[in-house]
Amino acid sequence: RESLMLQVNYRSLSSHQFDIPVSISVCGAPTLTFNVIGQSELPDVQISTTAFEFGRVFVGSSGEIETSITNMSPIPAVLLLDLTNHPEFRIEFSKSDMGSSENINAISLVSDQTFVTKMQDNSGDYRSSGQVAVSSNQEKGLCYKLNVLEHSEINFSLIFQPEQVGEHSFELPISMMNTSSSFPMMPIVSSEAIEAPIIMSTTAIDFSVRPVYDPQNVNCPPISHILRLHSAARDPINWRIDIKPEQSEDEEIFMITPNSGTLNPSESQSVKIQFYARKPIPYNSFLFLYVVSDDKLDNLIGKVQLTGIGSTEMFRPSMHEVCMPIVPINTKCQMDLHIENVGHVQTLLKIQMPVDESSFPVKVT
């Protein structure tokens, strides 16, 4: 006797009970028949936040609302959060939730935004909710794919970072993948972006790669950038700046001068930011600008990301590979290679070639 393993796959496009007859024709024997009976269900997914109300947020600043999505059902769920038409909104999540695996709770970016919400209707044809017309010169937002396993929860924060003055009100564009059913209880996202009383010249400053700071080397001062503040208020306004994460006075990484003051109407102020790399590691901090009101309360109106990398490298060549052109015999060719003294140290350099000049006719002068 021999046996044959038969596997029956059924893909449901909606939630319903099914009873499907299956016939197997056998040569020289009666036809075998049986029924495939079951019930398909949609994942029971719930959002902890019923409404994302950011209120009034200054242009250049940001608002954040934490939320979670819970899958109450015994089957996994795949969700799409399409913020393509809302570029001033994004989500932030833990690095442990970053990825695209279907075997763990994960959040990943969908790169192809013309096919973002690939859902199926009852006829089996694909449709895309991303078909809303968007101007070609308009900045587009991001689209996220969320894998939520059965009886599990995934956490993230919805971020509103306005760049222009205006009001926003829309349903959170989240949907289940490969189903025609809409997401239950769509939360409303509402916010208003208002002009900040102080306008900053930039929201990000990169100090690039810098040698580790040596207080004994007077020839290597810290690199600095200028942040300009301009008052758009009608009255004098007091301001101050904080750095997070907090720095100790002995090992200050980013030094700000001045870090507080008063701006009169239409007045500008230059803030000098110096970068002291204490260790050969990357640095990432945030500068927070506050306005001090009459009731002594601090109102956050903007933040600037400060990045830089410390390095123990004292000298840097202009190129790491030299490729000489093909020339006729007994014809000389040359190429200039510059060595940059990034550490600002006074020393002599000795250059050695690890090859024999007789076999490899190259001279370094």
Image: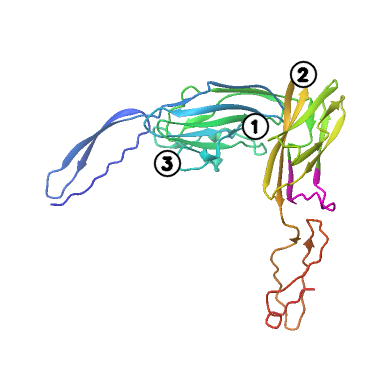
- Marking on residue 296: 2
Q: Mark 1 points at which residue?
A: 88
Helix, strand or loop for disc 3 = loop
Q: Give the range drawn in magenta.
A: 205-224
Q: In which quarter of the image is the C terminus?
A: bottom right
Q: Where is residue 241 in the image (x, y as percent from the top left)?
A: 77, 31
Residue in the foreground of this view, choosing between 22 and 277:
277
Mark 2 and mark 3 lie on one chain; the one further toward the N terminus is: 3
For the residue labelled by badge 1, is the local secondary structure a helix, a strand or a loop? Answer: loop
Nearer-N-terminus badge (1/2): 1
Label 1 environment density (alpha carbons within 10 Å; few <14, some 14–19, many ≥20)? some
In this view, 280 is above or below 144: below
User: Image point 54% across, 43% down: which residue?
Assistant: 112
Relative to 279, 128 lies left or right: left
Residue 81: give x, y in percent of width and height: 53, 33
> SS for tag 2?
loop
Asked whether 104 or 256 is in front, the reply is 256
Amino acid on which disc 1 is placed? Glu
Q: Nearer the viewer, residue 332 or 25?
A: 332
Q: Does the magenta stretch include residue 211?
A: yes
Alpha carbon of mark 2 to alpha carbon of mark 3: how far? 51 Å
Residue 109 located within the stretch drawn in magenta: no
Which amino acid, mark 3?
Answer: Asn
Callouts 1 and 2 close, C-beta under 8 Å: no
